[in-house]
Amino acid sequence: MRSLTTRQPRRIAVIFWIMTALFVAQMTWWIIFQVTNVPGDIVALERSLDLELYQAADSWRTWSGRLSDSLSASWSSLTEGEVLGGRLGGLPAFTSIELEGESGPRTIPGSSNEPVIGSLTIPISQNRATIYFSTEAARDWLRIFFPDVLYKSGPDSSKSPGDALTVARLSIDPAKAELVLEGRRGRVRMFVSEGIFFLLLILIGALSIHRALRQSAALERQQQNFLAAVTHELKSPLASIRLFSETVSARELSDAKRREVMDKITQDVIRLEEMVDDVLEAATLSRETYHPQLVDTDLSAAIQSYSELYRPRAERAGIRWQTQIPPGLRARTDYRHLRRAVGAVLDNAIKYSQHVSGDKSVQLGLTHSDSEAIITVADRGVGLSPADQKRVFERFFRAGDEMTRRVAGSGLGLYLVREIVDAHGGRVSVHSDGPGKGTTIEIRLPLITA
Amino acid sequence: MDRTILIVEDEAHIAEGLQLNLEMEGYRAIVVGDGNAALEIYRSAPIDLILLDVMLPGISGIDVCRQIRAEAGRVPILFLTARGDEDDRILGLEVGGDDYLTKPFSLKELLLRVKAIFRRQAWFATPGRVPDEFHFAGSMINFKTFEGVGPRGPVSLTRKECMMFKFLAEHPGEVVARDALLDGVWGYDAYPTTRTIDNFILRLRKHFESDPANPTMFLTVFGAGYKFVPPEQSA
């Protein structure tokens, strides 16, 4: 079972990170794909607008062909501009038409007075006609049929008049091009921002799942630690009791030795009792329904009496026991629970001081602020790392490794302290300058002011 | 001859109880409370048996045992621990422990096992029908140095593996019942479990069979026990 529980989360974590990597890769690919394949890509755009240009030029030539046919048909009766307007639908405004035929040259004035910028000469039977038109005329015509194509420059003298309006002189409307390009940039922006948003979403999700996994693994470890600690704490005194009681019944012992052995049995029974109490107390305090029976208590006297309970043990372990307890401080407490809380803190101070070398001391102080009584227990023991300080009040938490632990305990002591102090409306905090530098626990309880 | 037993136990009461009883049985008993002290004493004084707690301050009992075996120490080690699940027992035996007792234990059983360990050690140390260096099918095992050569090169064995091999080799071709094996190797039949014995057989196969999955020498006889068939007999 042990091996299962340590292996399982690792496998889950591996699967989880593979999934996350796949999601991120998929998302990144999507962004790249979308950005590189935005419609309105500059090449595609140019291609489509070029096509428009060619179509415009082509259409111009087609139109000139039609014009030629119409003019040929109505050659003899051509008169003023209004006649042309009627017979040659779609002809842009023109400046004039010169007809050159067997009957001699003839000029038909057109409808526009603008300067002539281009001409179109078309054969009519054996003769020819030259249509002169203005910039405005060309623009009008283009605007109607090809709104995105601009007439760019004046007549190109190198071209024959028939090609007056050629591709060379047509161009894309920059406003239109800008619009298309802006659309493209907009889409790129959208995909990038959307992609980054989803990437962040994936990463945040992944991180929170990762945290949850880690927390559950930590909880699992704590519970295993608790199980190991409780097993050790229950079985050690049991083993000792069994060993001594069997010794007493199997061996001939002197009266003194027998008494010594029986004393040890009693000590182990007490230790067992305390352990069982701790576990049961933790179960009781964890319940929502737990309410302490708070009564007006002489806190000074209570703390003084706890001090006397623990002083002998501390002094046996070579620990200097210093107290500063002014009389007369009162608080509403549940006496039994308060004794357990303060007792657990004192017990820890002794347990975690007794094995250090050098000056060993525990200072128990009682002071007060305007509204709170402050119980301080400071030791010069093993201390706590900053990371462990954050966790000492968690249930089952114990610093260090269960297999090589120097100090016995269930990991319930400070958890019980916090639960009890909370139920009293108080606060408990821990401070240590680091491993080897001692620990200070501070309990604050609401004061009853006279 | 006074045998010296080193008690490595951080629970003062248990250590005192063990010391009291072992001394009353006529052993010399030394008590230490942590793993490092145990290693120091072991290196400086002749020790005949170590009673080793698994959960110790400083370094764990498992690591103490590993360290002793790494230094080629052959002293028998009896583990004492509060944790008694199967994995823990197998781990204790794999790192070279000879036996395992779960707390709380019976005083009688503890003394019985201590005696059994000394008795079996005496049997193991006496040359019997099998020479100290035993050759078979191109392989070799030395019961004195716990070294061997298998089809895949040199191997290093634990005491219990060697004892088991020696016991099987003393009865070539015979079916050795599980009870007989327990009695012969451990000295009593209350422990270990079938799975632990199987585990030892598997390890012997791993050391010496050309194909451990299809053993030809270390055979399981279902419902009866185990059989060692030296190659010249199997031909």
Image (spheres, coloured by chain):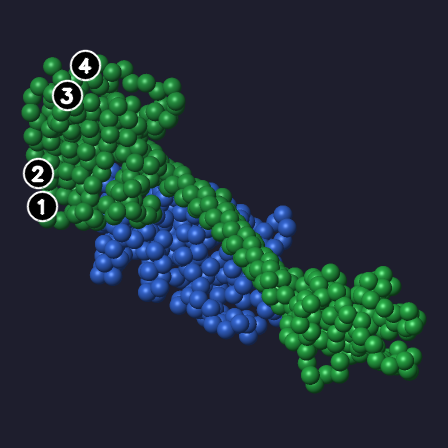
Query: What amino acid is labelled 3 in the image?
Result: Leu
Tell me which residue sits at (16%, 23%) in the image.
Answer: A371
Tell me which residue sits at (45%, 61%) in the image.
Answer: B162
Query: What amino acid is labelled 4 in the image?
Result: Asp
Q: For the view shown, which residue lies furthest in the bottom direction?
A: A158
Do the residues at pointers 2 and 4 share their chain?
A: yes
Query: What amino acid is labelled 2 in the image?
Result: Arg
For residue B122, above or below residue B194: below
Where disc 1 sits, the SS reads loop
What is the number of the mark on residue A359? 1
- Chain identifier of the green chain: A
On the image, the x and y values in percent for residue A314 come to 13, 35
Tell me which residue sits at (33%, 45%) in the image.
Answer: A402
Where disc 3 sits, the SS reads helix
- The CA distance from mark 1 to mark 4 is 38 Å
Q: Are marks 4 and 3 in contact (CB under 8 Å)?
A: no
- Tell me which chain the residue with mark 4 is part of: A
Q: Which residue is mark 3?
A: A299
- Chain identifier of the blue chain: B
- Tell me which chain the residue with mark 2 is part of: A
Specify few, some or many for label 1: CA neighbours under 10 Å numbering under 14, 14-19, or 20 or more.
Answer: few
Q: Is residue A226 left or right of residue A299?
A: right
Say whether residue B129 is visible. Answer: yes
Image depth: mark 2 or mark 4 in front? 4
Image quadrant containing the C terminus of chain A? top left
For residue A386, above or below residue A118: above
Q: Which residue is mark 4?
A: A296
